[in-house]
Amino acid sequence: MRRLWRWLIPLAVLPVLALLAYGFRVDPRDIPSPLIGRPAPAFGLTTFEGTPLSLAAHRGKVVVLNFWASWCQPACYEEAPVLERNWREYRDRGVVVVGVDIQDRREAAEKFVREFGLTFPNAQDLTGAVSVDYGVYGVPETFFLDRQGRIRVKHVGAVTDAVFRANVDRLLAEPGSP
Amino acid sequence: MSRLGLRLLTSLFFLSAAVSPVTAQPAAPVSEETVHEVAAQLRCVVCQNLSVDDSPSEMASQMRAIIRDRLAAGERPAEVRQYFVDRYGEWILLSPPRRGFNLLVWLVPLAAVGVGLVTVAVLVRRWTRHLRDHRPTRVDVDPAMSERIRREVDSGP
């Protein structure tokens, strides 16, 4: 009996240690999006140039939907040239990059677009409706949509050339919708 | 503000267009209390551990506007809550639903208190065992000595 107790107490600590080990290994900021695999929510915005911007207009293409803000230093500033570069490289292959500027001042956002010479469509989400529809909780966040218009990947943080190419190439290789 | 009013009006318009004139009811004005009630359950997504109701951030105020709009469009508070859960996951809820893995949050403290109580009970019994088992035994003093002690105690200092 006494020997049993001697072992039971240290053994009882094990489940607690296991729980703590699990808890501390999980990154509390790495929140899985429930939207993966689901149809991308539709939206209708107006670009900084004043032209309408909607997902429906790009049906059948691989869409890289990027949420950004001019105050998002330095990640948004790191990825802006990457997005522009890859947009130019892929635009003729059925890929479109769409930028959504959230929680921003128009002048600052326009300055950002000008500074980086962004030529892909960019629009402001004035009410936050689009960002909430996509479950955005920070900038930058980038969604990779397949040709069927489903959200396939959510990337949190600055997009690099490698991340852009790996995701877009994979989605381009999939059979598209007619 | 005028934009919000416009959104509200358009959502009301679509609502009234959606239901037939017979069943159409005047849309109940959304009480700020209900907006607060829903907002208080949701985590402000750009803050650390602050509710949408408490946060002064722009994102939170936009989320409150969305809550107000959806309530105005006739959704029940639970449906509005689910709208956010569908997009952000259960993470958006400040208090996790009591099921599955989340139950640990409620069960572990209870189990810890139980184990603690049992441990204290066992230890107290162990520490007091010798008091119960070895009661002070009577020491036999011979009558003469006993008489002498009594006399000396009685005579005082």
Image (spheres, rainbow, N blue to C red):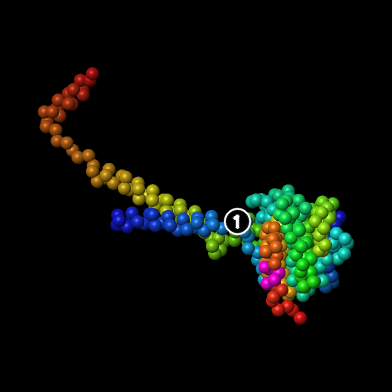
The furthest residue to the bottom: A178
Question: Please, what secondary structure does the residue beneath circle 1 have?
Answer: loop
Residue B33 located within the stretch drawn in magenta: no
x, y percent for residue B45: 68, 55
Q: Chain of mark 1?
A: A
Query: In this rendering, would B150 be left or right of A118?
Result: left
From the image, give the main secondary structure of the stretch colored magenta.
Answer: helix
Q: Is residue A177 visible?
A: yes
Residue type for callout 1: Pro
Left or right: residue B82 compared with residue A3: right
Task: Give the residue at the far right of this rendering.
Answer: A50
Quarter of the image for the C terminus of chain B: give it: top left
The residue lying toward the viewer, choosing from B53 and A73, is A73
| Residue A82 x, y percent position in the rendering | 74, 60
Q: Is residue B152 left or right of residue A126?
A: left
Question: Within the magenta stretch, is there residue A167?
Answer: yes
Give how far across and how far down residue A73 sits, in percent: 73, 51
Q: State the residue at coordinates (73%, 75%).
A: A148
Q: Nearer the viewer, residue A134 or B147?
A: A134
Q: Residue at x 76, y 81 (%)?
A: A178
Instruction: Give the magenta range.
Output: A166-170
Q: Is residue B87 visible?
A: no
Residue B35, quarter of the rendered image: bottom right
Q: Say which residue label 1 marks.
A: A28
The quarter of the displayed image where residue A92 is located:
bottom right
Residue B141 figure quarter: top left
Which residue sits at x=23%, y=43%?
A: B134
Q: Residues within 10 Å of mark 1 (few under 14, many from 20)?
A: few
The percent coordinates of residue B99 (x first, y second) are 56, 63
